[in-house]
Amino acid sequence: MTRMLAMCIAGFLLVSPLFAQEQYRATDSASTCPQPDSTNLSDITSLRIGVRRHARPFSYYSENLREVWSAAPQAPLALRNYTGYMSKICDAVLADMQVTRPADSNSFSYSDVKVVDVDCLIQEDERKGTPKPSRLEYLGDRIDILCDPATITNARRHGFILSPPLFLSGMGLINRGAERIGNRDCPDKPLIGYVRNTTAALAGIPKILQANELKSFSDLLRAYVRDQTNSCSTALSTSVVVQGYETHEKAAQAFCRGDFYYYIGDREIITYNARNIPGCGAEIEGAGQTYSNDRYAIYGKISHRKGTEIRDLRIARFFEILSQKVVVSPSLLDTAYESTFYEKPSRKLESFYWNIRGPRQP
């Protein structure tokens, strides 16, 4: 009896996320970058998972247990307080990899997962003056799998592994309804705010022009898209037309302060972050319309280098399990959605889910 009790206690300590969480909370916070998981140059087998710190509601850091622990038990990302729709999907796959594996493969455990905060990598590179053009550039270099809302584009097809489409969003535009723009030729502050390292500016602004939205400012926006002209002038002042921010958290704070007029980005992300600012949600207008159909996927990259065969097999195994969990019903997509958004999906999103996993089964 005593031996059985000891085994139960040991098992609880092994799988309890609350126990593991306390190991990290003392040094990790929502506002500062954590110490990266320990790695060394000879480690060529660990699976390096890229997460985001500021991409609510899809991949972000949180100390709210209700948000974090709705993921699978013994989930490596949740144990580091990373959560969100995409993070929960990755966690479910990583948890599955620990308990189901082919008989001829190497064992896989929590210690084989290294969690890498991509937002922190971007900040570090920008401080060094060596920014990468896209966060996907870290794949194959600093990370193996990127668990964030990455839009599927033709330019991103080559050199990567793509999951099935996991979410359907669209480029949106919100503004604070009580605020009106005075000078139409050159506003007194930036017209549009967006987050750098996203497709919001170069891909989103042309879509807004095609939809004949913001037609009073079409000349300014066409100059930005065609000629990369990002300023305008009046007799009294000169202003930037489009302003980039480091993270959605900072962009939402600036938007709610009134630092710019229109916030552009993927609809769910910009509305979620803006409404997360106290006193800002009631003023938001324009959140219901989208100007594109953007499909999100999880991206990965296999190195094909000598000596990394175990890691490459683990990457392939991850995408194999992910594909299986997505296309069946009940689908992992439904579980991740329900534990993240707490509301019914739109008709457009439900139609997307139906096409991915078929009719939903109980």
Image (cartoon, rainbow, N blue to C red):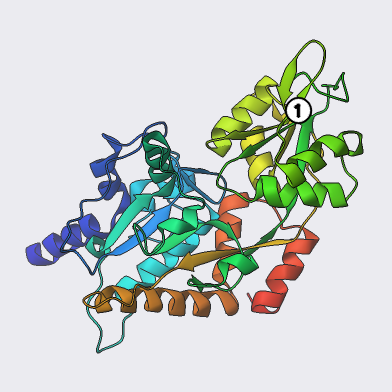
- Which residue type does callout 1 highlight? Tyr
- Residue 80's spot in the image, x, y percent? 34, 48
Res. 179 image quadrant: top right
Instruction: Inspect this view and state whether residue 142 appears.
Output: yes
Q: Considering the image in quadrants, where does the C terminus appear?
A: bottom right
Question: Camera-side residue: 166 or 17?
Answer: 166
Q: What residue is at 67 percent from the left and 22 percent from the top?
A: 259
Q: What residue is at 48 percent from the left and 45 percent from the top?
A: 60
Question: Camera-side residue: 356 or 155?
Answer: 155
- Residue 31's spot in the image, x, y percent? 41, 31
> Mark 1: which secondary structure?
loop
Q: Considering the image in quadrants, where does the N terminus appear?
A: bottom left
Is 161 displayed left or right of 230 in the figure?
left
- Residue 135's spot in the image, x, y percent? 48, 53
Considering only vertical position in the picture, is 287 above or below 6?
above
- Residue 178's spot in the image, x, y percent? 83, 22
Residue that numbered label 1 is attached to? 261
Q: What residue is at 88 percent from the left and 25 percent from the top?
A: 184
Q: Dot 1: few (<14), some (14–19), or many (≥20) neighbours within 10 Å? A: many
Instruction: Inspect this view and state whether residue 87 appears.
Output: no
Q: What residue is at 8 percent from the left and 65 percent from the top?
A: 3
Is 234 displayed left or right of 318 in the figure?
right
Considering only vertical position in the picture, is 113 above or below 321?
above
